[in-house]
Image (cartoon, grey):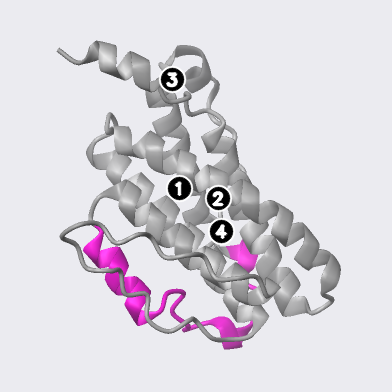
Amino acid sequence: MNSLTRTNVPERIHNRAPAGSRTTAILRLLFVASMLAGACFTFVPAKAQGRDHLTDAESELVRDNQQLDKRIEVFIKAMDRRFAIITGAAQPAPKKKEKGKDQEDWGELPTGTHAQLLEDIAGILDEAITNIDDVSRRDEKSPLIARSTRALTAASNRYLAQLATLKNQTKDPDELAAIDHIFANANEIIEVGTKIPAPAPESEKKKKKP
């Protein structure tokens, strides 16, 4: 899937639509824009094409986690694993085993050149956005949409700092192309995330309970 490109949201959406439907509209518009922007990244090197951006074990975890926010967590950790390999940082710690549940099996670490791992990250971001869009089409009032978008926005903000460092450290054209791809996706996610209302404090949630 291709990266997102900036799209101007129609004025009538800004002026008349309530906050929730406005956010959903933006998500959909950005997704449609990504489908129309094929020419933007036709320069991705041929050796990166045909490569699955998730390992078999990661794909299995995506299938196992049907709830949107849990699935987004899988995507974020999959990206974190690749950034850790590229930067030489420690791998993200596994989640604590929940009572009555098996430990998540992440399998072997992904392999590949830095350019391939970076393009994996761009593909994972694309898939995460697609999953959020799919849920918004079925149930635009689902609280999982805002929760998942916030999580993806927070991750994208973290990635921008790492990408800036990586861009200054490489002159490899394949790596630079992949970095620009991620930059475009991450910035669009952040643009949408800033329009998501902050979650209600726990005290208010408790008051609303009957």
Residue 80, by quadrant, is: bottom right
10 Å neighbourhood of mark 2: few (<14), some, or many (≥20)?
some
Of the two numbered discs 3 and 4 in the rendering, the one whose residue sits closer to the viewer: 3
- For the residues labelled 3 and 4, the Cα–Cα distance comes to 25 Å
Tag 4's secondary structure? loop
Q: Which of the two marks, 3 or 1, is nearer to us in this view?
A: 3
Residue position marked by numbered label 1 in the rendering: 32
Residue range corresponding to the magenta coloring: 39-65
The label number, if any, that marks residue 63 in the structure image? none
Dot 3 surroundings within 10 Å: few (below 14), some, or many (20 or more)? Answer: some
Q: Quadrant of the C terminus?
A: top left
Q: Does residue 29 appear to the left or right of 155 in the view shown?
A: left
Q: Which residue is mark 4?
A: 3
Q: Between 200 and 171, which is closer to the camera in this rendering?
A: 200
Would you name the residue on which mark 3 appears? 19
Q: What amino acid is found at the position of numbered circle 1 in the picture?
A: Val
Tag 3, which secondary structure? helix
**Residue 23 versus residue 44 in the image, above or below:** above
Separation of disc 3 and disc 1 at Cα? 20 Å
Q: Earlier in the sequence, mark 2 or mark 3?
A: 3
Spatial separation of the CA atoms under disc 1 and disc 2: 22 Å
Front label number (2 vs 4): 2
Instruction: Check residue 41 for magenta coloring.
Output: yes
Upstream in sequence: badge 4 or badge 1: 4
Q: Is residue 169 visible?
A: yes
* Residue 184 percent coordinates (x, y): 64, 53
